[in-house]
Amino acid sequence: MSKSWLTQEAADRLSAELASLETTGRSEIIKKIESARSEGDLKENGGYHAAREEQGKIEARIRQLKHMLENAEIGTAPNNADGLISPGMRVTVEIMGDEMEFLLGSREISSGDLDVYSEKSPLGAAVMGAKIGDTKSYNAPNGKTITVKILKAEVYS
């Protein structure tokens, strides 16, 4: 399994979210379930079913955060000394005559100012390891072949 890259700030933010969900998040949902359970018949108790569904979402997010943090490479962005595009970079490409700028990596490292593409996505896989000036192609989910020209790549900060 390949490791994903996270900034220290992103790792700290995710760790804090995990700690919150494991403590207050779980205890609050348990209280909601107990309160709804005390209302009687569980078959027709919408509050109980909603609380159980919320509990499932919280537990799924806890598992996701644990997995992400256990499998992350935490630190500073790659220095790009070799000129190759790698996760943690802001990439500008030309697709079908239009310029597009995005962050290559995990949405967890973004501050929200850019679209984010995983290095495992079709576009991300196409630009991974490429250099400025390269032209790459990938197959879009609709089956079309898309050609991408790399215009710019810099470390995301």
Image (cartoon, rainbow, N blue to C red):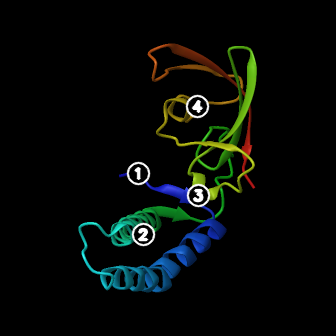
Q: CA distance from mark 3 to mark 2?
A: 17 Å
Circles 2, 1 touching at the beta carbon (< 8 Å): no
Above or below, comparing residue 82 to residue 147 in the picture = below
User: On the picture, is 19 further left or further right than 63?
Assistant: right
Circle 1 residue: 2
* Residue 122 on image: x %, y %: 49, 30
Q: Secondary structure at mark 3?
A: helix
Query: Which mark identifies residue 58?
Result: 2
- Of residues 39 and 35, the one drawn nearer to the viewer in this rendering: 39
| Nearer mark to the viewer, of 4 and 3 | 3
| Nearer mark to the viewer, of 2 and 4 | 2
Circles 3, 2 touching at the beta carbon (< 8 Å): no
Dot placed on the residue nearer the N-terminal end, 1 or 4: 1
Amino acid of disc 1: Ser
| Nearer mark to the viewer, of 1 and 3 | 3
Number of other residues with Cα within 10 Å of mark 4, as a class: few under 14, some 14 to 19, many 20 or more: many
Circles 1, 4 touching at the beta carbon (< 8 Å): no
Q: Secondary structure at mark 2?
A: helix
Q: CA distance from mark 2 to mark 4?
A: 34 Å
Which residue is drawn at the image coordinates 56% and 51% (left, top)?
A: 106
* Residue 125 on image: x %, y %: 50, 33
Above or below, comparing residue 131 to residue 39 in the picture = above
Query: Which mark identifies residue 108?
Result: 3
Circle 4 residue: 127
